[in-house]
Amino acid sequence: MKNIDIYGTIGPACAKPERLAEMFRLGMTGIRLNLSHTELADCREWTDMIRDAGRKAGMQPQLLVDLKGPELRVGAMDRPLNLTHKRIINLGTQPGDIPVPEEIFPYLKSGQEILLDDGKIQLEVADAAEACARCFVVRSGVLQSRKSIALPGISIHLPTLTESDKENIRAARAHGVTGVMLPFVRDAEDLKNLKQELLKADAAEIKIFAKIENMDGVRNLEQLLPYADHMVIARGDLGNSMPLWEMPAVQAEIAEKCRKAGKPFMVVTQMLASMETREVPTRAEVSDIFRAVIEGAASVMVTGETAVGRYPVEVIRYLANTVKSAVEYMNASC
């Protein structure tokens, strides 16, 4: 039977020793730690818990850390912000504004679309100044700190790694990290920069997972392949860079190129999103997982479903059993 790695994401919902151990027993082979909101040095309790839970389940889990990378994110806010339809809101530095990186202001013009939190929330710029932009809400939602920002049609060049990323890479081996995920990979230089940082940290054995989540990454995929150990079809932000109905074809294209090159790839984002609040997934979600395996995915991952969802153990049960079903189908078809 083909081995497919199954990853959850650690968070408050599953960060309990027995719960993690049960998830490993059900088939989870590794777990992701998202460093967009924290530092690795502050996660010792979780990384120790992951290793201990793996031992209880009779296995050695893989641990992936998701770096900040060249990604735009909302800054820290005192409390979640309810953005209702047609509400006027400012992006800027004043009290009550949504805090955003200063790098985006030169690109904010009247009519520019802004997508927040993987596109769940949509703003449109009404007018902009040097360090402030007045926007109105097109698609409503509740915005929390550190959520993603995307400007469709705009490419902003940011450094591959933040200083926080470099510090986390230096700490990676001590926490048992087996792989690093680099967001928003644009070209081969991004991956070369990451590899150089791993070498400087004496951590050359740590695998590189290149997240494809913008059109630069899609266009440059073939030049990226030699410099990554795994490609990641990260459909959250990738879906923000094109009309959503075009994304399945792009996913299929990336999968085909990875298969031809013999490069393992992962599929992630909203695989069982409904299970954040429901104990049973939709038929469409199960079919999505099945399709990813049929297309050749070496791994699949869930994020919020296990990090903050109500049913993290059931999520892994459905994910692992659906993967098993797909593998059995492929074996029977050979």
Image (cartoon, grey):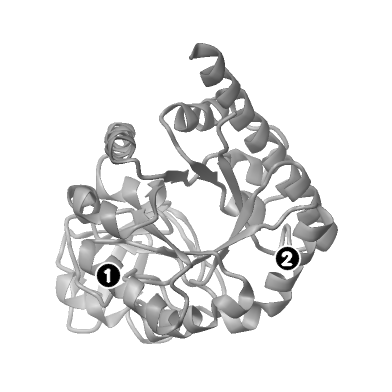
Front-lying residue, 333 or 255: 333
Cα distance between the residues tagged 1 and 2? 30 Å
Q: In this view, does 220 lie to the left or right of 208?
A: left
Tell me which residue sits at (29%, 74%) in the image.
Answer: 193
- Residue 96 % position (x, y): 44, 80
- Residue 190 % position (x, y): 26, 68
Q: Mark 2 points at which residue?
A: 51
Secondary-structure class at tag 2? helix
Determine the image quadrant of residue 72: bottom left
Q: Indicate whether 84 appears above or below 37.
A: above
Tell me which residue sits at (73%, 65%) in the image.
Answer: 51
Determine the image quadrant of residue 148: bottom left
- Residue 158 % position (x, y): 24, 75
- Residue 320 % position (x, y): 65, 36
- First in residue order: circle 1 vs circle 2: 2
Q: Indicate whether 88 appears above or below 115.
A: below
Tell me which residue sits at (55%, 19%) in the image.
Answer: 331
Tag 2: Cα neighbours inside 10 Å, few (<14), some, or many (≥20)? Answer: many
Image label count = 2
At label 1, the amino acid type is Lys
Residue 216 visible in the picture: yes
Residue 138 visible in the picture: no
Q: In this view, does 292 lie to the left or right of 52?
A: left
Q: Name the residue under label 1.
A: 192
Tell me which residue sits at (65%, 61%) in the image.
Answer: 10
Tag 1: Cα neighbours inside 10 Å, few (<14), some, or many (≥20)? Answer: some
Secondary-structure class at tag 1? helix
Q: Indicate whether 331 appears above or below 159.
A: above
| Residue, far top | 333
At label 2, the amino acid type is Arg
